[in-house]
Amino acid sequence: MTRLDQQMAFLTEIDQLKSVNRATTLCDASRFENSAEHSWHIALYALVLAEHAETPLDTEKVIKMLLLHDLVEIDAGDAPVFGTHDADALAQQEQAAADRVFGLLPDDQAKAFRALWDEFEANETPEAQFAKSIDRMQPPMQNLASGGGSWIDYNVTQDMFEARIGPKINHGAPKIWAWLRPKVAAFFAGPS
């Protein structure tokens, strides 16, 4: 296969991400979001919100991570954050998926994209931490807009949200968490 053949095989394969449905609905609650839409949306979140990071970021790198991070869901599926799944088994499935999906590319691109995916997963650099936080922030924003969305489906409480999601957003985007937290608390408190 030529380099262009490999690149086109990858681009054709990742079209499958459009068929991976998530637990979160669109903001208007008209249907469930798919993982490709999620990746596009959080890439835009990063572009718009990067100025709120604690330290200056390589925004292009953050966007690349966010566009690549869920490609493994083509093989491993989406695991809703409030769902039940075996985290170790899922991690193994995602590693195998990363090997396969990125392995479709020419070696240099395969290594570069896989390195970005690994960096995102390790969550150690400022870019990865911000990207992970934005990845966790978008679904609550959609749940707020849709009247509860997956929080209702999974019987989520404010305590559950604060324990499972709050630290993940706060870790890489404390300013955004400080802004979001009272909005989530108001939702769970109900109408006044």
Image (cartoon, grey):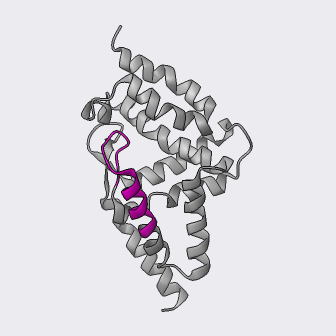
Q: How many labels does the image show?
A: 0
Which residue lies most toward the right here? 56
Nearest the camera: 8 or 128? 128
Which quadrant is the C terminus positioned in? Answer: top left
Residue 80 percent location from the top left of the image: 34, 45
Q: Position of residue 104 (x, y in %)?
A: 47, 79
Q: Position of residue 18 (x, y in %)?
A: 34, 60
Question: Where 106 falls versus 13 (above or below)?
Answer: below
**Residue depicted at 59% across the width and 74% down the height:** 111
Q: Position of residue 167 (x, y in %)?
A: 53, 33
| The quarter of the displayed image where residue 94 is located | bottom left
Q: Which residue lies furthest to the bottom in this view?
A: 1
Q: Which region of the structure is painted magenta?
A: 78-96
- Residue positioned 56% across, 57% down in the render: 65
Residue 23 is covered by the magenta coloring: no
Horizontally, residue 87 falls left or right of residue 84, namely right
Q: Can residue 47 be seen in this view?
A: no
Residue drawn at 41 percent across, 62 percent down:
92
Foreground pick, 97 / 10: 97
Image-quadrant location for residue 77: bottom left
Tell me, yes or no, whether the highlighted magenta stretch contains residue 84: yes
Which residue is pictured at 46% across the width and 27% down the height? 162
Q: Vertical placement of 36 versus 147: above or below?
A: below
Q: Can residue 158 be seen in this view?
A: yes
